[in-house]
């Protein structure tokens, strides 16, 4: 009923408020003219009083309508100067009130985007500084004659260069995923040989990057003939990043397990990556999927060379498939579980 009556409610419609202004002005003028006919007051005096009364009512209504617009104009100018913390008061229930609510939501979104931009620039600068500083130190020692350009020194420089290359590649991947320029190309494939090949490639690359030859890998696919429907290239990114994260947090002699099971519908896939590390506390299970979000162990962020982008890329790739990814309960270590629907469709 209120939705039907809203155009007639002067408190919930600017059009109705203007209509009531006209009605009130006409009513005041009519009453004063009737008073003039029944009294000795001159018609000219009544006309002046009617005009003054109409102007006062018009001024009151005009001020109430213009005040929120002027406030939004002032806030918009402040936002143009970079001040995204300004908000406007929402004291009306009409279209201007709806506009104020929309303006505040827009201001909040812009403030969040500006904060994320600043955090991204700061985090990228911080992450780039470390490998560049390490590489510069190695090269300066070689140039100054402090150390020889032997294989050990060059291996150190190579590791810093590879770390820098991984960071740049991850940033590019994340930028492409966010901008929607990475179209999905889903197709059906057999899971066990696909994951076996991905895991073998990841094993070679990760052991070279982490110098971890003590971590064992286990692939568990049931049934052996399991098939899935997804984009293999994007899924490759997901598995590689999850395995990379598991290797970093595995104890010496630990094991990383990749499990695959049939989903609820044909072509759907449930994939899990488990490690035997310290695990992720409940309070940090969403943080680790944010850009540059890194969990802490006993309040200390591990210095393992990670960038905090791997799980963010994994989430974006899974979201493009219309799937889900998160930290599942586990008796030991960390258990990342993702689900992909049977008919993956690009959400871009």
Image: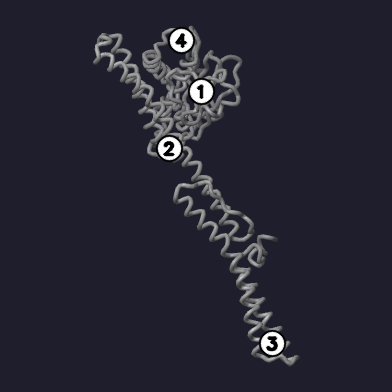
Mark-to-mark CA distance, 2 and 4: 33 Å
- Specify which label sits upstream in the sequence, 3 or 1: 3
Real-space Cα separation, disc 3 to disc 1, in angstroms: 84 Å
Tag nearer the camera, 2 or 1: 2
Q: Nearer the viewer, mark 1 or mark 4?
A: 4
Which numbered disc, 2 or 3, marks the residue closer to the eye?
A: 3
- Quick one: SS at disc 2? helix
Q: What is the distance, in whole Å, between disc 3 and disc 4 at their CAs?
A: 98 Å
> What separation in Å lies between label 1 and label 4 (alpha carbons)?
20 Å
Which residue has dot 1 on it?
271
Residue picked out by circle 3: 33
Question: Residue 215, which numbered label?
Answer: 4
Asked if the residue under mark 4 is in contact with the one under mark 1, i.e. CB atoms within 8 Å, the reply is: no
Q: Residue at x 48, y 30 (%)?
A: 315
Task: Please identify the residue farthest to the right as the structure is shown.
Answer: 38
Mark 3 crowd level (few <14, some 14–19, many ≥20, 10 Å Cα): some
Q: Secondary structure at mark 1?
A: strand
Do residues under tags 2 and 1 come within 8 Å of each other at their CB atoms?
Answer: no
Give the residue pinned by disc 2: 178
Circle 4 crowding by C-alpha within 10 Å: few under 14, some 14–19, many from 20? some
Name the N-terminal-most of marks 2 and 3: 3
Nearer to the camera, 273 or 270: 273
The first of marks 3 and 4 along the sequence is 3
């Amino acid at each position: 009923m209120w939705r039907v009556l809203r155009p007639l409610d002067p408190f919930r419609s600017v059009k109705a408020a203007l209509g009531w202004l006209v009605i009130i002005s006409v009513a005041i003028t009519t009453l004063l003219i009737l008073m003039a006919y029944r009294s000795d007051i001159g018609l000219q005096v009544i006309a002046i009083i009617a005009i003054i009364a109409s102007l006062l009512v018009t001024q009151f209504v005009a001020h109430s309508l213009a005040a929120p617009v002027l406030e939004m104009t002032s806030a918009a100018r402040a936002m143009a100067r970079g001040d995204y913390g300004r908000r406007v008061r929402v004291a009306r229930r009409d279209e201007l009130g709806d506009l104020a609510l929309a303006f505040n939501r827009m201001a909040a979104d812009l403030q969040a985007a500006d904060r994320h931009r600043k955090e991204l620039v700061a985090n990228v600068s911080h992450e780039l500084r470390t490998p560049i500083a390490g590489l510069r130190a190695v090269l300066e020692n070689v140039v100054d004659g402090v150390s020889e350009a032997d294989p050990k020194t060059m291996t150190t420089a190579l590791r810093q260069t590879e770390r820098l290359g991984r960071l740049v590649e991850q940033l590019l991947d994340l930028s492409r995923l966010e901008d929607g320029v990475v179209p999905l190309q889903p197709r059906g494939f057999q899971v066990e040989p696909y994951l076996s090949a991905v895991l073998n490639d990841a094993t070679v690359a990760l052991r070279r990057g982490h110098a971890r030859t003590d971590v064992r890998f286990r692939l568990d696919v049931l049934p052996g003939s399991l098939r899935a429907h997804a984009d293999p290239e994007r899924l490759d990114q997901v598995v590689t990043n999850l395995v990379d994260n598991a290797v970093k947090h595995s104890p010496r002699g630990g094991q990383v397990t990749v499990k695959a099971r049939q989903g609820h519908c044909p072509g759907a896939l449930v994939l899990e990556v488990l490690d035997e590390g310290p695990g992720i506390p409940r309070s940090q299970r969403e943080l680790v999927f944010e850009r540059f979000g890194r969990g802490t162990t006993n309040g200390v962020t591990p210095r393992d060379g990670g960038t905090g982008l791997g799980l963010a890329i994994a989430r974006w790739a899974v979201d493009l498939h219309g799937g889900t990814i998160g930290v599942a309960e586990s008796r030991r270590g960390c258990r990342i579980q993702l689900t992909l629907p049977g008919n993956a469709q690009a959400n871009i």
